[in-house]
Amino acid sequence: MDHAPGVPDVFDPRTYAAGVPHARYRILRDHHPVAWQAEPEVLGWPAGPGFWAVTRHADVVRVLRDHAGYSSHLGATQIRDPAPADLPFIRRTMLNQDPPDHGRLRRMLARAFTPARVDAFEGRVRERARRLLAAARDAAVDGSVEVVGAITDEYALLGLADLMGVPAADRGLLLEWTVRIIGYQDPEDAPPPRLGPDGVPLDPRSPALLGEMFDYARELAAAKRARPADDLMSVLARAELAEGELEMFFFLLTVAGNDTVRSAAPGGLLALARAPEAARRLAAGLVPVDRAVDELLRVHPPVLSFRRTATRDTVLAGRRIRAGDKVVVFHASANHDERVFADPGRIDLGRSPNPHVSFGDGPHVCLGAHFARLQLRVLHEEWRAALPPPELTGEPKRLVSNFINGITRLPLRVSGRCG
């Protein structure tokens, strides 16, 4: 099935390199809230069968909450279908399971990911933010610095590594693995894909490409059993896990845990740079930082889309969906739905209520949302104390991806009077 006439394409990952396609999303929300999208070959990745794009807030929430009708397990949670041989492996991660199996794994991880354990890291997170911001200011050229490389990548990476208990010498590996898995659609952000025997690029989620990460996870777990500490890997290393579950937890924490803040931090700074009055209000302490963080998450959700697979024939927003069809929710569109958010194109740092879906909804709502919010709040508090409101000094560069709302380059002014 091809695109219907007048239905804009929101699949092509190259579209997102120019910015989130809000004008296209609005056309879909207003006229085609559940719209069929073709899935042609792009950037060397094979064509797929197509999918339904869900763009209104109410429908996105409905899909995310209805795990019985829209499965995370059947075809996993990214738009592109995994290779059939890889699917059983990919299904083993918590992200790609449905209740009740998902609930068992989530409860196990939640016991390690307690709010008290997360909150205990605030002092360390704040100290790191201060150090990175001061170093960026000192290294600035003509008052400007590229903040992704100088601040936000390392800030996200080291916060996660502390929480997981990854030794300092090994922390660069987490970023290397994240870039390889998350940035695979971007020819400049990830290494060239490895090809399978058929000449088709190997899926970055494939076990053939995750062996190094899994070997490391097993070695780290053994070290934590011998010398436990108050970190996630120490808890998981002592838990009663089935074969392979430790490695899949490590995979999920490394990629999802790192890239949430890695995407949201520069995205929020970019949003402020493009809304100077909002940035001045935040710098002057006129809005609560926690509300500001949620508004910036609404404007720049770390994840653009998540896929489900229909378990049965159904109807959504008047469209007939067949069992086995791919159904993809678009978070960035739902967060700009005029039916829910007044004047959604305007950044209102005091917006309340703010029912954005940047951390999902339903059984798969992000387990690390509390830690992500803590890191983002601290970063903005320390930025306000040390640096002027964000101001662009060059063009940002965005990740080529229809999955992650990534910023790969963001030059900002870091000298001048603070808020």
Image: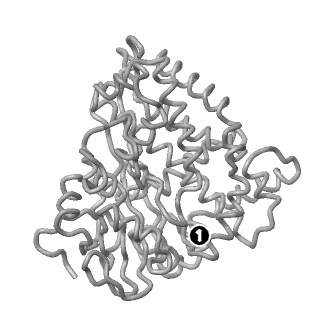
Q: Quadrant of the C terminus?
A: top left
Residue at 25% x, 80% y is 319
Position above or below: 308 against 183: below
Q: Percent from the top left, x then y, of residue 134?
A: 53, 18
- Residue 257 located left or right of residue 41: right
- Residue 115 located left or right of residue 83: right
Q: Percent from the top left, x then y, of residue 323?
A: 39, 87
Residue at 55% x, 31% y is 378
Q: Nearer the viewer, residue 197 or 406?
A: 406
Q: Percent from the top left, x then y, of residue 304?
A: 37, 56
Q: Quadrant of residue 350?
A: top left
User: In the current view of this chain or complex, which residue is farthest to the top?
Assistant: 417
Residue at 49% x, 81% y is 84
Position above or below: 282 against 312: above
Q: Quadrant of the N terminus?
A: bottom left
| Amino acid of disc 1 | Pro
Name the secondary structure under disc 1.
Answer: helix
User: In the current view of this chain or complex, which residue is farthest to the right?
Assistant: 226
Q: Nearer the viewer, residue 213 or 248?
A: 248
User: In the current view of this chain or complex, which residue is farthest to the front?
Assistant: 353
- Residue 209 located left or right of residue 232: left
Residue at 84% x, 48% y is 228
Q: Which residue is mark 1?
A: 207
Q: Percent from the top left, x then y, of residue 224?
A: 82, 51
Are there few (<14), some (14-19), or many (20+) residues within 10 Å of tag 1?
some
